[in-house]
Amino acid sequence: MINEKMYAYGASKSSIREIAAYGAARAAEIGADKVFNFSIGNPSVPAPDEVRRSIERSLTMPATQLHGYTPANGLPECRSAVAGSLNRRFDAGATAADVYMSVGAAASVSMCLHALTNPGDEVIVIAPYFPEYRVWIETSGATCVEVMADPTTFQVDCDALAAAITPRTAAVIIDSPNNPTGAIYTAETLAAVAETLHAAEARLDTSITLLSDEPYREITYGADVPWVPDVYDRTVVCYSYSKSLSLPGERIGWVFVPSTNPDHDHLVPAIAGAGRALGFVCAPALFQRVIIDCVDVPADVASYAANRAALTEGLTADGYEYVEPDGAFYLWVKSLDPDANAFFERARAHELLPVPSDSFGCAGWVRVSYCVSLATIEASLPAWRALAAEYGR
Ligand code: PLP
């Protein structure tokens, strides 16, 4: 017997990955310089030199240590390094015991969802949202509940959030800087979210966890990214080095449970249990050592800022409307066709490959991932112009 739910996840695939794969095949067919693959968040910026130097240092270690199992939750030195960095940056009161090293943010969020929910519980996502959230929520046995963001600012709409909370609401996932809109939730937004959750907890006599998924925390263009545990006590933070250090293929990140979270003592073992149950144990040892060495190495934001400037200037000149991105490396562009899938097909005819918004839980937009090279963005501008011209712009 085959598990049909798993079959469906495998057979239907994520549209981001499907478009990325189409782009790779098309590039092989007509040449990489003729395809503008804006689908996946795979940084073109190289990992920092410190990463290479750290790996070279590790290679001198005895083989058993180099490739050996680490403790399930990660090397103590690595967890201490992460805690130290959080304390330096956010005065987080973190210790190594509060950190679980994971296989990227995908594992971090999945483990938290398994640890936080029971079958029949509900988890709220703020639409548009990273599509894999739905898969991870459903796999944990919970139900995914979509709440639309404010359609102009793409901040959290707290009235809509309040209306969606029920006695079964176990958690709310937020993602700031946001994939796909590039919005950064302001201190005011987060304070309003905290107030909304506290009010609902009091009204319904429940507890609701705020799961802050932050793989883009360092990729910002000037705006502040508030530290969520300072705003709401029952918070868990998920992180990944996939974007900040350009290491998406190495699968390394963490979960942090602040000691101020009232569930801390129960939740830390529950996350370890979820890691055990899901097989997300002993994150890659080589890259745990990289994190010890590189925990405070900055992201190359300047490259993304240059891409953002080139893309937004080009699209503005062609009459496109988009959300001014404060962070991450995605541009959320209004589809020129009411049907974003139809718009995607016409874009594809120009070898432009954004991702239609429907799989992000929202109609009428496309996501343009601009972590490609600046040369790709510049070379794509005539195609964007020709596409706009088809729509009379
Ligand atoms: N969360 C968000 C918002 C993302 O954009 C991504 C990847 O693009 C992930 C989680 C998964 O990150 P990772 O590749 O580190 O598992």
Image (cartoon, grey):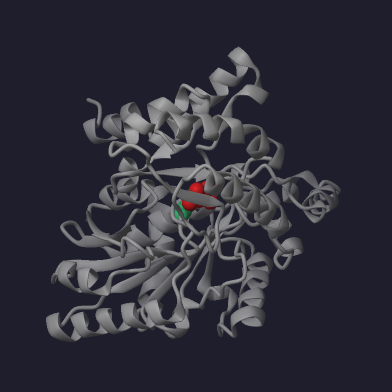
Task: Find residue 76 and report its horizontal and vertical position in percent.
Answer: 64, 68
Task: Find residue 325 and report its horizontal and vertical position in percent.
Answer: 52, 59
Is residue 274 placed above or below 4 in the rendered structure?
below
Q: Quadrant of the N terminus?
A: top left
Q: On the image, which quarter does residue 77 sit in?
A: bottom right
Query: How many circles with numbers are drawn on the protein?
Result: 0
Residue in the image at 60% along x and 50% along y = 313
Is residue 1 placed above or below 359 in the rendered structure?
above
Q: On the image, which quarter does residue 196 sit in?
A: bottom left
Is residue 333 placed above or below 378 in the rendered structure?
below
Q: For the view shown, which residue lies furthest in the front direction?
A: 392
Task: Find residue 94 and report its horizontal and vertical position in percent.
Answer: 56, 80
Q: On the image, which quarter does residue 109 sit in?
A: bottom left
Of residue 5 and residue 222, the one placed in the foreground of this image is 222
Residue in the image at 82% along x and 50% along y = 61
User: From the viewer's perspective, is 280 left or right of 14?
Assistant: right
User: From the viewer's perspective, is 176 left or right of 307?
Assistant: left
Of residue 151 and residue 386, the one placed in the foreground of this image is 386
Q: Quadrant of the C terminus?
A: top left
Task: Find residue 60 and report its horizontal and vertical position in percent.
Answer: 86, 48
Q: Is residue 280 visible?
A: no
